[in-house]
Image (cartoon, rainbow, N blue to C red):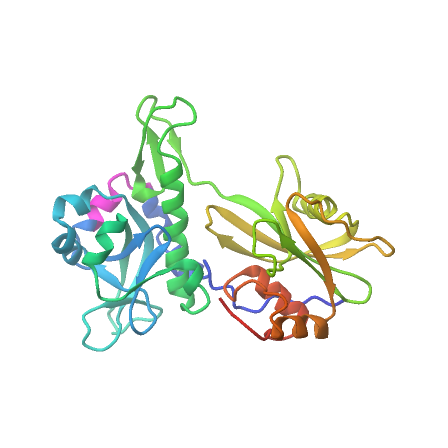
Amino acid sequence: MNWYELPNTLKIGSAVEILNVDHSDHDQVELTGELWQRLETLVLLLEGDRAMVDADGRLALLSTQEIEHSIGEQVAKNRIQLYLGRVFESEGIPDDGISVAGFEPQTQDAKRVPVLAIMLEPSETEKFSIGEWLSLRSVADTLNPLDAGLLTRAVALANWHKAHQFSPRTGHRTNEAKGGWVRVDDADGSEHFPRTDPAIIVAVTDASERLLLASNMAWNERVFSLIAGFVDPGESLEQAVLREVKEESGLTVSEPRYLGSQPWPFPASLMLGFSALAKEGESTEPDGVEIRELRWFTRDELKSAIISGEILVPGGGSISRAIIEAWYGKELPGQRD
């Protein structure tokens, strides 16, 4: 079949042109400490993968002074702070006092202001009541690309900090540095950087343009998605496509074609989308370990199964949903989250 470029709906991590403007700032040793003192600095509040979303569906960004007033100056300064980049400051709902990230300057002489994320404890969220605390998964499809990019970057960095508090080289504690983009080993001074784990996700089709969907053992049995898996060391992306499909479905595929990518910070993946063509005459066989069931769908069959509630497909913020809809030819019916 003819595959086309994925539609620009993969909002997670999509605001690259805004967030990478000041990438060199990461090298400043005392970056967050210096930025915290600036009156113009905006702060994204983060608890796990949840952030505060204002009534207009925008990420609520506060000043450092407002945060210090709510949880205390010393407590705020001792929290891990993450440098996310720079944005144009904009007003959210008129007169609500909450700032949001803007794509464009509000005045002719406006300049981009720094954005930090601060990691809160669950008990501290009740001290901020200017919006609703929502997870990245639940709002990925409704946030604008800039907000989705900010929150994705914050969640990805926060997950890395939580999992790498000790050095893999010496076992000693590490401390954050350079805007939260490095952790330094107390013992030997070695620097450790955020990791990203590449994973492929594959739309397998056959000669009749049917799409193969799989039900994973870890999911509700009604949920069906594309075959996916991590790339092994020493393996190319194309090799990973062929191997994962064979392992999980028993099918031999050919013609792996790259479609697009999406950062997926749950906890630290980069999803690389592919299409592949199944060899004729082979039958599917779930591996019984990861995959519970495999089903081929025509476009009409998939539509009917979704409308009837027989199956559920991934939410609208995921690359899996975007690839399935690219195959389907338009937006699927049913749930988006």
Q: Which residues are magenta?
A: 27-35
Front position in the image: 142 or 153: 142
Name the quadrant of the N terminus: bottom right
Q: Position of 290 compared to 88: left or right?
A: right
Compare residues 100 and 201 and report the one nearer the observer: 201
Task: Note whether 10 is above or below 125 in the view shown.
Answer: below
Q: Nearer the viewer, residue 170 or 312?
A: 312
Percent position (x, y) of residue 92?
Answer: 26, 72
Q: Is residue 65 left or right of residue 9?
A: left
Residue 133 lies, in percent from the top left, at 31, 61
Residue 41 in view: no
| Residue 32: % across, % down | 25, 46
| Left/right of residue 276 with respect to residue 230 in the rendered view | right
Which secondary structure type mostly characterizes the magenta part of the structure? helix
| Figure check: 9 above or below 83 | below
Based on the picture, tell me whether residue 180 belongs to the magenta stretch: no
Look at 62% across and 59% down and name the residue there: 225
Res. 236 in view: yes
- Is residue 33 shown in magenta? yes
Outermost residue to the right? 281
Quadrant of residue 297 within the rendered picture: bottom right
**Residue ID at (52%, 67%):** 316
255 or 164: which is nearer to us?
A: 164
Please state the horizontal and vertical placement of residue 21, each as a whole percent of the image. Answer: 37, 56
Is residue 154 toward the left or the right of residue 305 in the image? Answer: left
As drawn, the residue found furthest toward the bottom would be 94
- Which residue occupies 51% across, 47% down? 269
